[in-house]
Structure formats: structure tokens, C-alpha cells
Image: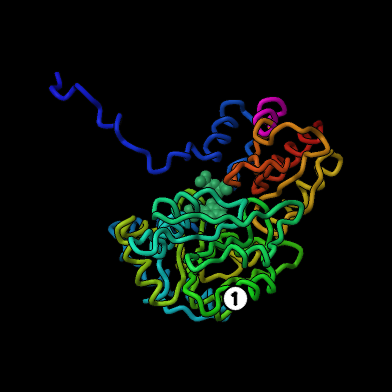
């Protein structure tokens, strides 16, 4: 019998994230599984990755590449990433000092935010500009580092950025701006003008940027991805975050990366080495080989545009109001013409009653703004998308 039984230590633990519960992705995926619904909620492909990629991982595992990778990532993968970046965007990152492999984009985002944001005794908390709706890992990372999120609210139908409003939110305390293009959950894609507007605001100021570009290869209707690295004023202050999960249908492998100028990368790596130290070794070698064939990512826009269009064709007879998504594998739709239920309630009801799970967009706003929008992930097999669209059209 324990002699330490009077009081549990947990009773006095004060939460560092009092407002955080279980993420909506887990909640909705669980509900979809329990009810047998088609799961268009959490963003992950419903089909498998390439068998060639699996064979490459198998090959490197059998060859004995099973111990710790270098902290910064295996050289072959860093070099392949630098080469791909040069080929695609014309920007040269040094694989030794400016490219770091991480355990998913989630880790890279956390490390980059941690490298910059602080609460200093003299100046107080740093302010971080967040465009909302915002991917759910950003704000907890800011708060755990003692920073304060300052929100710029984007609204349907087009979620474009009002740069005048952004400039009014920038103060002497603004230390970081979080960018996400193509955007989750809205699919909104930044234009060259957005890059220029941001550059004008941060020029000559001590403001850094984390640019989450995990959907860099998934853009539609001939759009181009304008990476922040392509603007010199932005490039010198930006941590570019990428993920192989979205590009090669391997969200469960959790491999991402950060591209940043050497001085930023030095600080980034100080955090990365104590967060995870390194990332799974045989997968890194496999990805280095697989990246050498550009078609593996060049075919993605066509591949996903066909799926988007198939899903939208299926919804044509529905009562949703839809603007085709510009990028990412998410489609948001407005149900304002159908019902005035809160979006969370509708997402739960649709899962239970018609058997299609979605994500309510209000969860991506800090005050849970409800614009009657729900998000569907269309990275699914064609038959699944057709069946889901048919069910949704009954509403
Ligand atoms: N950023 C965005 C915008 C995402 O949608 C996701 C996940 N889908 C991530 C980051 C996290 O990526 P990873 O799974 O590589 O950690
Ligand atoms: N990024 C995925 C989405 O937006 C989910 C990632 C996760 O489950 N944490 O749905």
C-alpha cells in the first residue's frame, strides 16, 4: 500500500492551456468512426501513398538505416529539398545551414514560434499577428511561449485580407506574423499583392514571419503558389514550413521541414534539438530518393482538382452555397440558406443523421465566430466523394 496517499499532485497543477480541449479533428474523426459516417472531417488522404515510396522505406530499413538521424536531418534529404526549392522558386537555401528536417510541420511551427516569441521582463509579452480562422496549433504555441495572439479576422465568402486593418494591428510589440497559404480551413491563396503588402508593413522592423506552406503543391484553376521566400524583404525574416504528409499522402509519417536564413535556422535548431532531436531515419532516406522525380509533386494540382470538381459536381443540386476552393484539399460551404443551427451542431447532426462528418469552421476563430460554414476534406476516393455528395444533397 502506498504511503503517499493524502493528496494527488494533479490537484494543484494549474493548466498552462486552460482553454484547450481535445482538438476538433480528434472529436469529429471519433464521431465518424462511432457512427460509421463518411469521414470528410480531419484532413488526411483516404487512399494510400505510392508503393514505390513504401519500398524505398523498406529498402533503407533493411539496409540498417535504423539509428538516430543527424539532428538537422539526413544530408541527402536536406540537399534534395534545397534543390527542389531552387528548381521551383529560384531561391537557394544552403542545405547545411538553412534546411532542417522536423517531425511534421507541427513540430516545425512550434520550434519556429518558440525561437522568436518571448515574454521579457522589461518589454513584457511579444505580440503575434494571427489571421483567423487559424490552424489550431498556432495559438497554443504562442501562449506557451508567453506571447499574446493579436487577431486579424477574415470572413466569408472570400476571406481576403484587409491590409489596412492589418497595419492598424501592428505595434512596437509585434514580433511575429503567422501566414498560411494555401489556407486551412478556407482554401484561400495569397496573391503577389498580398506578399507586397506584407513586405511594406514589415520592412525595416524587427518582425519575423512563420509561413505555413504545407499545401504548396495543391492549388487550383491555374493558380501559382507565391511562397514568401520569393520576396526578398520577406525571405530574410521568414521560417518557411513544409510537410511531406500533404504532398505524398503520408500524413501518418509526420515528416516536415523548415527553410530559413542561417541566423534564423541557428535559433530554430536550438529548439528542435530539444523538442525531438531528430526525425525518423529510413523515411528521410526514402524521401530524398523520391523527391528526385518532380512528377511526384507536379501532378498534385491536377490530381486534386479532379477530386474537388467531382465533389462539387455532386453537390450541384444541393442547397449549399459554394465557391470553389482555391487551394488545399479542403472545401468550405455555406449552409446559411438551409438552416440557422450553430455550425458545430450541424456538423454533429450531419454525421449522425446523414452519415457525413465535416469540421465546423467556427472552431478556427478564437471567439468561435459562426458564419454558417463547414469544411469538407476531399482527399478521398472518388466513390466516397460521390456518395458523400449524394447524402449531402438530401439536406
Ligand atoms: N499546418 C496546416 C495548415 C495543416 O493543415 C497541418 C495538418 N494538416 C499542419 C500544419 C501539420 O502538418 P504535419 O502533419 O506535417 O505536422
Ligand atoms: N491538418 C489536419 C486538418 O486540418 C488535421 C491534423 C490533425 O489531426 N492534427 O484536418
Q: Residue furthest top?
A: 1
Q: Residue furthest front?
A: 122
Q: Quadrant of the C terminus?
A: top right
Residue at image position (68%, 47%) is: 378
Q: Quadrant of the N terminus?
A: top left
Residue stretch rendered in magenta on the structure: 346-355
Q: Badge 1: few (under 14), some or many (20 or more) residues near its Cα, within 10 Å?
A: some
- Magenta stretch, main secondary structure, is helix
Residue 22 higher or lower than 93, as above or below: above
Left or right of 314? Residue 350 is: left
Question: Percent x, y for residue 151?
Answer: 58, 55
Residue 95 higher or lower than 323, as above or below: below
Q: How many numbered dots are placed on residues in this image?
A: 1
Figure quadrant of residue 5: top left
Question: Percent x, y for residue 331?
Answer: 70, 49
Given residues 292 and 312, the one toward you in this image is 312
Left or right of 249? Residue 76 is: left
Q: Is residue 171 visible?
A: yes
Question: Percent x, y for residue 140?
Answer: 46, 49
Q: Is residue 124 magenta?
A: no
Given residues 48 and 154, the one toward you in this image is 154
Residue at image position (85%, 44%) is: 316
Residue at image position (77%, 49%) is: 310
Figure quadrant of residue 367: top right
Left or right of 197? Residue 210 is: left
Q: Is residue 49 visible?
A: no
Question: Percent x, y for residue 306?
Answer: 74, 55
Residue under pointer 1? 199
**Secondary structure category for the residue under label 1:** helix
Amino acid at each position: 500500500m502506498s504511503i503517499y496517499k493524502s493528496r494527488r499532485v494533479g490537484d494543484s497543477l494549474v493548466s498552462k492551456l486552460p482553454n484547450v480541449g481535445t482538438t476538433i479533428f480528434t472529436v469529429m474523426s471519433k464521431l465518424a468512426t462511432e457512427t460509421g459516417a463518411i469521414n470528410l472531417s480531419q484532413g488526411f488522404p483516404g487512399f494510400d501513398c505510392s508503393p514505390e515510396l513504401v519500398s524505398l522505406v523498406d529498402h533503407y530499413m533493411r539496409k540498417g538505416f535504423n539509428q538516430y538521424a543527424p539532428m538537422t536531418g539526413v544530408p541527402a534529404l536536406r540537399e534534395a529539398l534545397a534543390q527542389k526549392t531552387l528548381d521551383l522558386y529560384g531561391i537557394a537555401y544552403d542545405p547545411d545551414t538553412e534546411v532542417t528536417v522536423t517531425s511534421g510541420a507541427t513540430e516545425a511551427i512550434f520550434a519556429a514560434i518558440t525561437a522568436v516569441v518571448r515574454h521579457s521582463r522589461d518589454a513584457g509579452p511579444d505580440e503575434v499577428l494571427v489571421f483567423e480562422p487559424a490552424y489550431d496549433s498556432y495559438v497554443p504555441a504562442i501562449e506557451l511561449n508567453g506571447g499574446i495572439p493579436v487577431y486579424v479576422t477574415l470572413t466569408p465568402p472570400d476571406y481576403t485580407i484587409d491590409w489596412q486593418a492589418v497595419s492598424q494591428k501592428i505595434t512596437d510589440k509585434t514580433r511575429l506574423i503567422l501566414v498560411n497559404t494555401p489556407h486551412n480551413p478556407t482554401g484561400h491563396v495569397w496573391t503577389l499583392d498580398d506578399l507586397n503588402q506584407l513586405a511594406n508593413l514589415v520592412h525595416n522592423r524587427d518582425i519575423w514571419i512563420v509561413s505555413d506552406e504545407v499545401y504548396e503543391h495543391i492549388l487550383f484553376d491555374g493558380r501559382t503558389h507565391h511562397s514568401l521566400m520569393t520576396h526578398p524583404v520577406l525571405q530574410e525574416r521568414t521560417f518557411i514550413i513544409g510537410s511531406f504528409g500533404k504532398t505524398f499522402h503520408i500524413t501518418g509519417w509526420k515528416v516536415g521541414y523548415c527553410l530559413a536564413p542561417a541566423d534564423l535556422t541557428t535559433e530554430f535548431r536550438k529548439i528542435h534539438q530539444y523538442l525531438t532531436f531528430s526525425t525518423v531515419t529510413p523515411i528521410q532516406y526514402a524521401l530524398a530518393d523520391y523527391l528526385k522525380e518532380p512528377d511526384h509533386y507536379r501532378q498534385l494540382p491536377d490530381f486534386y482538382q479532379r477530386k474537388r470538381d467531382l465533389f462539387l459536381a455532386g453537390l450541384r443540386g444541393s442547397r449549399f452555397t459554394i465557391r470553389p476552393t482555391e487551394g488545399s484539399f479542403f472545401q468550405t460551404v455555406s449552409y446559411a440558406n438551409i438552416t440557422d443551427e450553430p455550425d458545430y451542431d450541424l456538423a454533429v447532426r450531419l454525421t449522425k443523421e446523414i452519415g457525413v462528418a465535416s469540421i465546423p469552421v467556427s472552431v478556427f476563430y478564437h471567439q468561435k465566430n459562426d458564419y454558417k460554414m463547414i469544411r469538407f476534406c476531399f482527399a478521398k476516393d472518388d466513390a466516397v466523394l460521390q456518395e458523400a455528395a449524394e447524402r449531402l444533397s438530401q439536406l
